[in-house]
Image: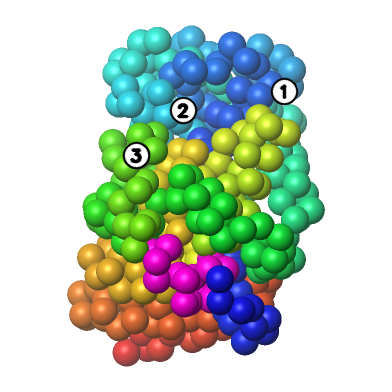
């Protein structure tokens, strides 16, 4: 393994995204939902005077007024249920789907159980990370440079390589490049390429990566980072009962991008050399800040290649806080 040069190398950044999070929280509270097609629905608006539903009340809904679906289990996604549907539409495409309404308090949705669960995940991750940055109720960027360096100093290279390759997709594998072609909006609905993988598919490209990493300390640290993320994900599942997906890269934009490629309960390593391959055909809306109309405007002005090159060159700077270089880039495009 090449010698470590602490400080001279880019950080090792992980990204954790919980799988179908509100459903997972409901499942942890009610094991009858495990393995079943189910979805969480919003509370019905315009229902003043109805009694509040506390978290411990029976919140299963079989009919009557219901809000829209906000979280869908992967079993229900496989049967055609998507986030945009109403409860009635979901029942039509998947009659066996179980619909659970969010709790309410004072006549409004009460999301505290989901916030508490998200905080518990961050607390657990923080125990082994240099820094954590909560990006949303169920997403966390983590600086795992110290944990990766600790593994490099305490475990044999062959052991780390075997552990990382057995658990981790490479972001420039054929499978990943194919997954990256899916737009963020369809990924959010739960597209049909999101599924658990046969682990034999993970082998694609790893032999070459491990050979090259022997003389590449940046790659070795990221490979160790993949092992850290694998262990953290296992710890989250065994301690809190939630599965999650993970990404590893040298900055949080790329780590998040890698994380979103393979869900649920999978992880992806984005090594520096893989970024151009992955970004070549990437729908721009998969990059933070480039969704919606703005992303379309950027695309129509042929800035896609420029954007891709810029993201590859980004350093993460401080994990916690705003990424000023990336924001300056977005502003510069906006003013063109
Ligand atoms: P997401 O991370 O977007 O999705 P998810 O965790 O349900 O599924 P995936 O496995 O594909 O990541 O959202 C996290 C939670 O936030 C989700 O479970 C419910 C809530 N949410 C809403 O309430 N409204 C919304 O429009 C979205 C997108 C999410």
Res. 200 mark: 3
Q: Which of these two is toward me, 178 or 218?
A: 218
CA separation, marks 3 and 2? 25 Å
Disc 3 vs disc 2: which is toward the camera? 3
Magenta segment range? 209-222
297 vs 23, left or right, is left
Q: Would you place residue 172 above or below residue 328 in this image? A: above
- Give the percent coordinates (x, y) of residue 241: 66, 30
**Residue drawn at x 56%, y 61% as measured from the top left:** 157
Which is the main secondary structure of the residues drawn in magenta?
Answer: helix
Q: Earlier in the sequence, mark 2 or mark 1?
A: 1
| Residue 49 seen anywhere in this rendered image of the structure | no
Quarter of the image with the C terminus in it: bottom left
Q: Does ligand 1 reach within 8 Å of label 1's beta carbon?
A: no
Res. 73 mark: 2
5 vs 272, left or right, is right
Callout 3: SS: helix
CA separation, marks 2 and 1? 19 Å
The stretch drawn in magenta includes residue 251 = no
328 vs 285, left or right, is right
């Amino acid at each position: 393994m090449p010698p470590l040069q602490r400080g001279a190398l880019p950080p090792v950044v992980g990204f954790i995204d919980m799988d179908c999070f509100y459903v997972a929280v409901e499942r942890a509270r009610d094991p009858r939902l495990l393995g079943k097609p189910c979805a969480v629905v919003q509370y019905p608006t315009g229902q003043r005077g109805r009694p509040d539903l506390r978290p411990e009340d029976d919140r299963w809904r079989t009919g009557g007024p219901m809000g829209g679906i906000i979280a869908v289990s992967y079993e229900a996604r496989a049967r055609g249920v998507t986030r945009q549907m109403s409860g009635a539409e979901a029942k039509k495409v998947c009659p066996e789907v179980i619909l659970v309404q969010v709790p309410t308090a004072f006549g409004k949705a009460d999301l505290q159980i989901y916030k508490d669960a998200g905080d518990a995940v961050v607390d657990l991750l923080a125990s082994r990370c240099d820094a954590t940055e909560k990006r949303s109720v169920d997403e966390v960027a983590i600086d795992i440079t110290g944990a990766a360096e600790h593994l490099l100093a305490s475990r044999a290279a062959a052991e780390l390589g075997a552990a990382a390759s057995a658990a981790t997709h490479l972001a420039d594998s054929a499978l990943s490049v194919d997954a990256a072609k899916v737009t963020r909006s369809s990924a959010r609905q739960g597209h049909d390429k999101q599924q658990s993988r046969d682990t034999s598919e993970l082998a694609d490209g790893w032999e070459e990566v491990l050979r090259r990493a022997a003389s590449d300390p940046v790659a070795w640290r990221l490979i160790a980072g993949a092992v850290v993320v694998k262990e953290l994900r296992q710890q989250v599942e065994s301690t809190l009962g939630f599965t999650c997906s993970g990404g590893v890269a040298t900055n949080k934009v790329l780590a998040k991008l890698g994380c979103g490629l393979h869900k649920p309960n999978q992880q992806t390593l984005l090594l520096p050399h893989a970024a151009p391959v992955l970004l070549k055909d990437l729908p721009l809306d998969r990059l933070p800040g480039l969704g919606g109309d703005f992303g379309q405007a950027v695309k129509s002005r042929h800035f896609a290649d420029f954007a891709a090159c810029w993201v590859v060159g980004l350093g993460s700077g401080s994990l916690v806080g705003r990424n000023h270089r990336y924001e300056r880039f977005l502003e510069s495009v906006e003013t063109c």
